[in-house]
Amino acid sequence: QVQLVESGGGLVQAGGSLRISCAASGRTFSGNVMGWFRQAPGKGREFLAAISWSGGSTYYADSVKGRFTISRDNAKNIMYLQMNSLKPEDTAVYYCASRRLSGFVGPYDLWGQGTQVTVSS
């Protein structure tokens, strides 16, 4: 069984940058697509970005395109989200998730516990 663990969240000033990580641990890992989501207080889950694990192709939501960059290190089984030009409205709990099927749209099968990102004005 694979476990996803996010890390790197914290407090950052508006306009600043932060990189959060998602480590896949366990005896096996077979995710086809990995993605980042977030949920702010009182709001639903929001898709941010996804990456094909083998090919490295990426897909971004319009809300973060040009500011956030998703990447992965296949050898270490770690996915990253580099967040630049952060805004107070980016404040949320950020989750990573794995999807077994190809394609960026559809159900994600495995989720991490989340990491809090707070952007001060």
Image: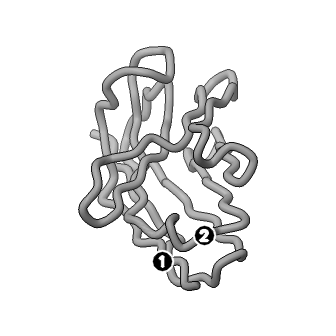
- The residue sitting at 59% across, 26% down in the picture is 52
Secondary element at image label 1: strand
Q: Earlier in the sequence, mark 1 or mark 2?
A: 2
Q: Which residue is mark 1?
A: 118
Asked whether 24 or 96 is in front, the reply is 96
Q: Position of residue 66 (x, y in %)?
A: 75, 47
Q: Position of residue 118 (x, y in %)?
A: 48, 77
Secondary element at image label 2: loop
Q: Nearer the viewer, mark 1 or mark 2?
A: 2
Q: Position of residue 56 (x, y in %)?
A: 69, 28
Can you say whether 101 is above or below 19 in the image? above
Asked whether 105 or 54 is in front, the reply is 105
Q: Which residue is mark 2?
A: 87
- The residue sitting at 38% across, 64% down in the picture is 93
Quarter of the image that includes the C terminus: bottom right
- The residue sitting at 43% across, 27% down in the picture is 30
What's the image's color scheme?
A: one colour
- The residue sitting at 41% across, 16% down in the picture is 101
Q: Label 1 to label 2, Cα distance in Å?
A: 9 Å
